Amino acid sequence: MVLIIFYLISLAQASKEQDIESALEILNSFCQGCSIQYLGEAKGYGVIAEKDFKFGEITMVIPYKDIITSFDHYPWSTYFESFNHENRLIPRLIYEKFKNPEKTNIKTLVNFLPESFSNYITMSSDEKQYFSQAFPKFKIYFPVSCIEGFNNYLSIIKNIPNISDCPECLLNTTYTWACQNVLTRAYGFKKLSWTSIHTPNKKITDPDTLGSAIIFGSDMFNHMPDPKIKIKSLITSGVQVKTSPLPQVIVRTDRYTNKGDEIFHSYGNKKNLELINSHGFIIENSPDDYYSLLAPRGDKECRLVYENNKMCAFYLEKNTLNKELLIFVGGREGVKDFDDFFMIDGGNDVEKVRNEVVGYREIVLKYDFDRCEIGLREIRRKLRNDEYSSRMIRNIDQVCAISHKLFYTHLKHLEKALVKVYYYKLFG
């Protein structure tokens, strides 16, 4: 019996590996001077340049038959016409993965989609409570409904004949899986493009409709900030639909890339706090990323005020502490240089604390989980003896684990804790 179980497990593993190889073979056939490679557990798969790329050069050509859109006709499409276009891709993914009996490129690529995600939707109730406490003013908008939408989906899919033959199709976990993939991978796609491909000689009189599409291959790019390169050229970057000579999707570079480097694409102007919670990834090393912190104003002065002058707002960049905020909390005026703040009333001891705490924060930002825990233990050891320590330590407790899993969801909370460390060590 044990040998039989081991044999079946081995067969399943071999089949899964074969599916991955088949999907990579299809995806690499789209590449023009690039290849899809596994970049480690933290990143997953990415696109590597096999030559030097200039702005606007083609990196992928994807046949139209190998993408799916919210306008497509398939056996379930008539049942979900009441769904908005963003949500229509959810049942399509479920159909392709669990119901479609044909072995197609699309089915192979759907099976290659991620099985798990890390964002606000997948947080535990404790994590969501922690997030709401750390970011009380932050509102999350999801273009597709991965939680409330399941009941509507279930009420419709139960009307499909013989759906009981697909028990996976009725599961909330299956719906969430499909929804998360739509949320993290879908592009906007216009009905005009769909019509021009399917009926190229038809005169289009209907108003255009914005739908969505999963363009396999283009979803493999990891994301970086918009490089803000102004090119005086008719060639543009990004994803484009072409109807002739063959219907296909063309992906062009939006930045210069050297051979051997990962090819990135921008993700608009969303900040990392939005990206991690709605899409499940962040833009690493973004020079433009920031978030804001509100603090009660009282009788103090600050440059930016909100809520009828009752609150001060401070913009916090990813890799630096905010000088104005530190002065605001510490009540110190007349500091002309950022470094001067840390040299007040303490000399080398204060500088040492500063280096330890800032160094710890930088470690957190670099996703180094093991070094993060070592650094946290050192800070705890140094602060253990004073009364404030126990309260402060609770503030930063488990930040390494939270950072490793969710990164930006705790960062503002950590910022407050570090500001308190500075304040009590400098002025306590």
Image (cartoon, grey):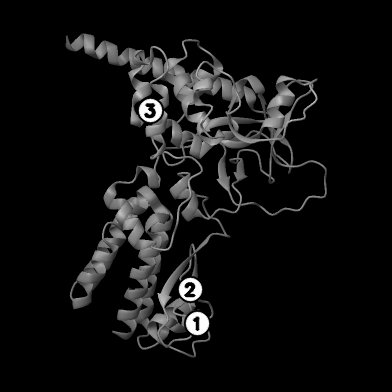
Front label number (3 vs 1): 3
Q: Quadrant of the N terminus?
A: top left
Whole-number angstrom distance, CA of label 3 to CA of label 1: 52 Å
Where does residue 76 sit, x and y in percent of width and height? 50, 19
**Helix, strand or loop for disc 3:** helix
Dot 1 crowding, Cα within 10 Å, few <14, some 14–19, many 20+: some
Which of marks 1 and 3 precedes in the sequence?
A: 3
**Quarter of the image holding residue 118?**
top left
The reply to whether discs 2 and 1 touch (Cβ–Cβ < 8 Å) is yes
* Residue 2 vertical placement versus 398 (above, below): above
Where does residue 56 sit, x and y in percent of width and height? 74, 41
Observer-nearest of 402 and 67: 67
* Residue 319 vertical placement versus 424 (above, below): above
Relative placement, left or right, of 124 versus 61 is left
Kind of residue at badge 2: Ala
Front label number (3 vs 2): 3
Residue that mark 3 sits on:
154
Which of marks 2 and 3 precedes in the sequence?
A: 3
Kind of residue at badge 1: Cys
Residue that mark 1 sits on:
302
**Helix, strand or loop for disc 1:** loop
Dot 2 crowding, Cα within 10 Å, few <14, some 14–19, many 20+: some
Count of numbered labels shown in the rendering: 3
Residue 58 visible in this rendered orientation of the protein: yes
Residue at 29%, 63% in the rendered image: 396
Which of marks 1 and 2 precedes in the sequence?
A: 1
Observer-nearest of 106 and 347: 106
Residue at 43%, 54% in the rendered image: 366
Kind of residue at badge 3: Leu
Residue that mark 2 sits on:
313
